[in-house]
Amino acid sequence: MAEYVTLVTRGGTPVRLANAFGVPYPTSGSGSLVFSDSATFTNPVFVNPTYTGNYTFAGNLSVGGNATITGTSSVGGAQTVGGALTVTGVVTTATNAIIGGYVTVAGNATITGSASVGTSLTVGTTLAVTGATTLAAATATSLNKVIVTAPASGATLTLANSSTFQTVGAYAAVLTFTAGTSVTFPTTGTLATRAGAEALTNKTYNGNTWTAGTGTLSIAAAKTLTASNTLTLAGTDGTTMTFPATTGTVATLNTANTFSANQIISVTDNTNAALRVTQLGTGNAILVEDATNPDATPFLVSATGQVVAGTTTAVSFSGGATPLYETVTTTQLLSGFGAALWNSTTTTGPTVRLAHSRGSTIGTHSVLSDSGVMGELVFEGSDGTGFIEGACIRAEVDGTPGTNDMPGRLMFATTADGAATRTDRWQIGNNGYLKNLSGAFGRGAPVTKTANFTVADTDNWLISNKAGSTCTVTFPNASSWTGREIMFQNYENHTVVSASSNVVPLGGGAAGTALLQSVPGKWCTVVSDGTNWVILQAG
């Protein structure tokens, strides 16, 4: 049996609704229903209704076709529309709304439960859905002028509770993901692009921190910068650092480093030193070894500037002298100093120079006084405890020096037996004279000849003791021995003559051969004048 719909009119009196033929209108069926004023329905079922007033339903609203409401729609229960729902006013649905077609609401739409729309949803002002909202597949959905484009199959946009997704400025924002990507954005800030030029401050990449600053880090294509520990590169403007092509370890400035390969220092600098070593402590400034450390015979430069070869510390000489240059060794052939010259255009050889100025500043000059020492060669020997001077050759000023005038003399000194200090023995003055300072002069022991003989280089006193005949003497070339003195004495009753006519008689004249008469005890002294041997004294 058919059910009647109770219609509450403006006066509030319930009216039974009948169709055009007087038959009561059923709660379900087909056809169109047009109302001209406001009404209240309880659980009605309509097909394609069109109403120009307001709808108020205490229960559920079910429309089989399309529903067009010019005014306001208020549904106390669920709202189900098989086709399209068009409301020019406000839509309020107490529970769920299921719309098979599109929904057009000119005003606000409030749905307390869930909302399901088959095609499109258009709301003029505000849409509020407390439950889940489902919009069927469409080309695009517009929410407050924001267009949501339909994906090919399905997608999910999830916003956490009390969160906001917002863009600023009239620009497009495109997020492209290639797989299941999870990106965490910072609290505030600006995102950088891979291809753009942005300034990054205080960033950490894979555990590496980049501190704020202004500069450029450039890494060439296909190159890698790897640091297994802290890496600090510090430089001034315009600094260029070139690392070796092969794998190795970069030396540090404030720690000890061991170099296992040869190192080359090559610079072009007309002002500064190519290598400067500053030792502020007491250790050696430079140590060069030819054996595994510690080398007992190194070459070193001490903290005080001493250059020592052959030992690890400088040696003290007599009087506490510690020269700036020392060579110390246990091998005789390595001891001493050597100098060699290869030059086809000079007639001089290597030179050892000793110089002295009384100026107190290096490079300044102040004249020496008479007897001032220009330099010394000192010879020392160990007495079992330390070194003691044994002999000395000393150069002194011999007179009053002046501009381009430096008279000099050589002093020869020896240390007597039982003494510890030297004594001057001989002097060669600025005039070339040899002066005996000890009061004694020795020229070697006399040599006795018993046959004809040749004067040796070391012969100074000669005795002829040849028996039976004249003794003939062969002299060295006088030109090689200018100024040499030779003394002869005859022990036999025969003459002593020269093998050549190179002897000038005591009274002068042409050079002949006679030296001594055939009388025992006769003697003479001959001196080379560079051409002959001249008898200067005889008896």
Image: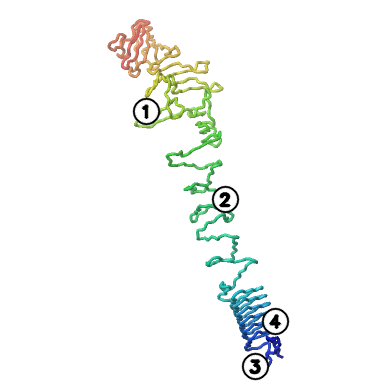
Residue 403, visible in the rendered structure: yes
Pointer 3 with pointer 1, Cβ within 8 A: no
SS for dot 4: loop
Q: Position of residue 488 (x, y in %)?
A: 37, 10
Q: In which quarter of the image is the C terminus?
A: top left
Give the residue pinned by disc 1.
348
Give the residue pinned by disc 4.
58
Please tell me which of labels 2 and 4 falls first in the chain.
4
149 lies above or below 335: below
Q: How far apart are marks 2 and 4 (CA)?
A: 76 Å
Which is more toward the observer, 501 or 179?
179
| 494 to the left or right of 306 | left
The label shown at residue 20 is: 3
Give the residue pinned by disc 2.
228
| 247 to the left or right of 64 | left
Q: Position of residue 512 (x, y in %)?
A: 29, 12
The residue lying furthest to the front in this view is 11
The residue lying furthest to the bottom in this view is 21
Q: How far apart are marks 3 and 4 (CA)?
A: 26 Å
**Could you tell me the amino acid type at mark 1?**
Thr
Please tell me which of labels 2 and 1 falls first in the chain.
2
